[in-house]
């Protein structure tokens, strides 16, 4: 059955030109005419062709058709956007800029759902269901999206209640990995001015990496999601109230160990650790469960020709994780148990002028308070008893760390556009931020009942790993001003040129995971780190005719005080403002409508990322440190997840085949040049260039009442490493005479049958 489905989809792919990049395309309106893509990237409804920002927009229809329900899948088709689950965190990267794996970091790319800020890495995993569109804004967005949008912003806009009764269901089953997805939508109008929309989603995923230790396929995931939205209008006031609940549980990671070198490959002691790339793992589990609850109240008041928008948001989540961080079957680091709880309350108010004046503007204010509580336990297991002294002293001991943080942020912002002539416009904006944070971290070394050694001896061996008991607290207030300006010139009614400047800032904070105090003799740890800063210059053009749409941009960004994880020489990392970088590149997008049935679309990105100052890089195995005491100079190197070339291409075909029936087909390819998948400059953790093919074929009613489809992803069955690094403790246990590697790998070829209906 699987071979038949592969043949059908592959035949469809080979029969269609692979030219385009499909993001937001639907069936052409007229002969070859492209539909207008409307976005709210500047807090106004505008054609994407008139917005002076490098932006990609993905429609909800396209996401639903391809069975896309999470941000990782969205990112695969947007050049210069990468979303990756690492060993202990989730990471968004835009133009090579991202945050590391420390829970004290804010994300460098700010994510917003219905105007509410989702800044924590756990929230990246929220299901993306029944959305209107997703907008990806590349480059710093300081004025309207605020602090922490230093690499860019992602805006998710969900569907609101409509005026018609609607019942919709989508069901799909994927054969290879036993994936079931069920989506239900009910829209009920109460009157001409009020209505309700309810969405439910369920996913069960069987996994694609066989775990020989636990005798199961990883990752095994279960997701439940519910959203209810009420909307009402009365006179000049329109209000919507949304509530969401999500529960996603994952057992295991698609992690595999590979490439043993030196004595790790020759010493019989390590022979039981498999390092062949064969889609098999040996770890004892990476299990996590996250529960999210949020509510958003949006109110729009018409005040003459002006409008007042108020957006109130509350976000809560709790997450628990059990991570086998030695990544092998032996109970060395038996488990790292992590728990995290977060609460956020926010309020934004905006006054927006009408669009038809010579000068239009937006002014507003923003308030946010949050509370974060996190803990983790690193446990040395029974396998340590089989090792020589002093390693056996560590058996049945653990470090216990607790961290708490509170934050309060106030902002005021304004942005205005002056039309100097009918063709020439100048925009300027500024945002003032004042944020206060306080935090405290406590770490203690504890031994269990089976450990026979004195606690002083236990602490001494932990200290050799640069982990010591400590307690530290602190607070700070940081103020920032982030200006922006751009100029737009309409060469014709179809062609617009623009140039822009923006300064971005990402908040400072506290290092949650450092294992020592900043004052610890011999191996100082870390606690507080400074904000990150960026200056971005950008220029480009946008063109839109009846059947052709083009966008081209060049950017040049300088980052300083980059918040970086610095290896502590033991088993952990410290956060430091250790590096600076220069990032420049080109982004291009195009759509072409050909007749009534065919649409080509596409985008490609060239990225040139170089650290201009980073002298505290972790040295790869076999390299001699060239910066005291034991660092390597990464100046001139590129960042993690920063391929020079990336893009995607697709073709959409739509053709009537019978009375009231139509046939649709989509062929798409995502591609990337070589990139580094780990934080260490090690060629063994690089991903080779790849092209990943996908396709969708469907038959359905021409009015959309029903449809049956086949959806294929990674039909070329590419092996793609998402994140990689040295196998923990591999150099320690070999006395730095050997090493092995570990990585998380992307999903293999998968094909689903999808059925949907609505009335």
Image (cartoon, grey):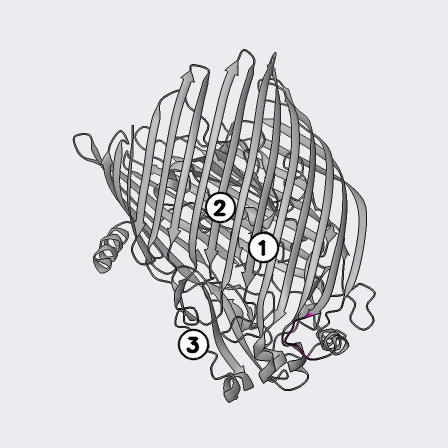
- Tell me if residue 449 is in the magenta stretch: yes
Secondary structure of the residue carrying numbered label 2: strand
- Circle 2: is it few (<14), some (14-19), or many (20+) Cα within 10 Å? many
Q: CA distance from mark 1 to mark 2?
A: 30 Å
Farthest left residue in view: 658
Residue 236 at x, y = what percent?
A: 56, 13
In front of the other: 716 or 343: 343
Quadrant housing the N terminus: bottom left
Which residues fall within the magenta stretch? 447-452
In front of the other: 179 or 403: 403
Disc 2: which residue: 247
Secondary structure of the residue carrying numbered label 3: loop
Residue at 47% over, 82% down: 272
Q: Is residue 15 above or below residue 686?
A: above
Are the two marked residues, 1 and 2, in contact with CB atoms closer than 8 angstroms? no
Residue 276 is labelled as 3
- Tell me if residue 189 is in the magenta stretch: no
| Residue 549 shown left or right of residue 652 in the figure | right
In front of the other: 110 or 501: 110
Quadrant housing the C terminus: top left
Q: Is residue 624 above or below residue 746?
A: below
Mark 1 vs mark 2, foreground winner is 2
Disc 1: which residue: 96
Q: Is residue 173 visible?
A: yes
Residue at 72% over, 69% down: 467
In front of the other: 157 or 490: 157
Q: CA distance from mark 1 to mark 3?
A: 30 Å
Which secondary structure class fits the magenta region best? Answer: loop
Q: Is residue 612 visible?
A: no
């Amino acid at each position: 059955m699987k071979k038949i489905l592969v043949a059908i989809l592959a035949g469809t792919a080979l029969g269609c030109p692979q030219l385009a990049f499909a993001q937001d395309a639907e069936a052409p309106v007229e002969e070859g005419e492209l539909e207008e893509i409307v976005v709210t990237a500047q807090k106004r409804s505008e054609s994407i062709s008139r917005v002076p920002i490098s932006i990609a927009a993905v429609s909800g229809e396209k996401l639903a058709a391809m069975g896309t329900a999470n941000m990782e899948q969205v990112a695969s088709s947007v050049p210069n956007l990468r979303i990756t689950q690492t060993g202990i965190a989730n990471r968004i990267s835009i133009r090579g800029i991202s945050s590391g794996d420390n829970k004290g970091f804010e994300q460098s790319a700010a994510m917003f759902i219905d105007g509410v800020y989702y800044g924590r890495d756990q929230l990246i995993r929220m299901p993306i269901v029944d959305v209107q569109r997703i907008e990806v804004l590349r480059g710093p967005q300081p004025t309207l999206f605020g602090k922490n949008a230093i690499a860019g912003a992602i805006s998710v806009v969900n569907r609101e209640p409509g005026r018609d009764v609607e019942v919709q269901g989508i069901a799909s089953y994927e054969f290879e990995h036993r994936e079931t997805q069920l989506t239900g939508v009910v829209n009920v109008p109460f009157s001409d001015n009020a209505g309700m929309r309810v969405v439910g989603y369920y996913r069960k995923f069987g996994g694609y990496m066989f775990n020989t230790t636990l005798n199961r396929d990883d990752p095994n995931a279960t997701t439940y999601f519910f959203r209810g939205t009420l909307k009402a209008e009365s006179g000049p006031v329109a209000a919507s109230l949304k509530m969401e609940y999500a529960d996603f549980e994952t057992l295991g990671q698609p992690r595999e160990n590979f490439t043993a070198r030196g004595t790790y490959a020759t010493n019989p002691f390590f022979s039981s650790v498999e390092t062949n790339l064969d889609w098999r793992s040996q770890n004892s589990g990476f299990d996590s469960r996250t529960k999210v609850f949020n509510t958003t109240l949006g109110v729009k008041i018409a005040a003459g020709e002006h409008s007042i928008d108020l957006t109130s948001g509350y976000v809560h989540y709790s997450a628990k994780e059990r991570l086998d961080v030695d990544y092998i079957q032996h109970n060395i680091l038996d488990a790292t148990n992590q728990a995290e709880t977060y609460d956020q309350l926010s309020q934004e108010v905006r006054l927006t002028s009408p669009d038809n004046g010579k000068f239009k503007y937006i002014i507003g204010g923003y308030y946010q308070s949050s509370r974060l509580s996190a803990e983790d336990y690193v446990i040395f297991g029974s396998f340590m008893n089989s090792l020589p002294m002093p390693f056996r002293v560590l058996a049945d001991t653990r470090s216990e760390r607790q961290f708490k943080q509170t934050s309060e942020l106030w902002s005021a912002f304004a942005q205005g556009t002056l039309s100097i002539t009918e063709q020439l416009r100048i925009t300027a904006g500024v945002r003032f931020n004042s944020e206060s944070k306080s935090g405290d971290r406590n770490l203690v070394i504890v031994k269990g009942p089976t450990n026979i050694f004195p606690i002083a001896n236990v602490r001494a061996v932990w200290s050799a790993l640069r982990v010591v008991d400590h307690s530290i607290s602190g607070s700070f207030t940081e103020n920032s001003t982030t200006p922006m300006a751009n100029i737009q010139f309409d060469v014709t009614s179809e062609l617009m040129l623009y140039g822009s400047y923006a300064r971005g800032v990402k908040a400072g904070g506290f290092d949650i995971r450092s294992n020592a105090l900043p004052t610890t003799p011999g191996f100082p740890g870390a606690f507080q780190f400074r904000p990150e800063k960026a200056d971005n210059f950008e220029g480009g053009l946008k063109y839109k005719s009846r059947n052709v749409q083009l966008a081209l941009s060049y950017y040049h960004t300088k980052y300083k005080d980059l918040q970086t994880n610095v290896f502590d020489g033991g088993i952990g990392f410290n956060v430091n403002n250790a590096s600076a970088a220069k990032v420049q590149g080109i982004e291009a997008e195009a759509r072409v409508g050909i007749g009534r049935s065919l649409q080509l679309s596409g985008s490609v990105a060239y990225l040139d990322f170089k650290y201009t100052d980073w002298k505290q890089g972790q040295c790869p195995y076999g390299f001699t440190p060239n910066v005291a005491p034991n660092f390597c100079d990464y100046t001139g190197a590129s960042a993690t997840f920063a391929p020079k070339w990336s893009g995607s291409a697709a073709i959409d075909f739509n053709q009537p085949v019978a009375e009231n029936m139509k046939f649709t087909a989509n062929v798409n390819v995502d591609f990337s040049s070589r990139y580094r998948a780990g934080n260490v400059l090690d060629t063994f953790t690089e991903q080779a260039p790849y092209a990943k093919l996908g396709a969708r074929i469907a038959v359905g009613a021409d009015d959309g009442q029903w449809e049956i489809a086949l959806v294929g992803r990674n039909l070329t069955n590419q092996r793609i490493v998402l994140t990689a690094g040295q196998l923990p403790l591999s150099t320690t246990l070999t006395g730095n005479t050997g090493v092995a590697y570990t990585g998380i790998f992307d999903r293999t070829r998968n094909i689903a049958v999808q059925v949907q209906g609505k009335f």
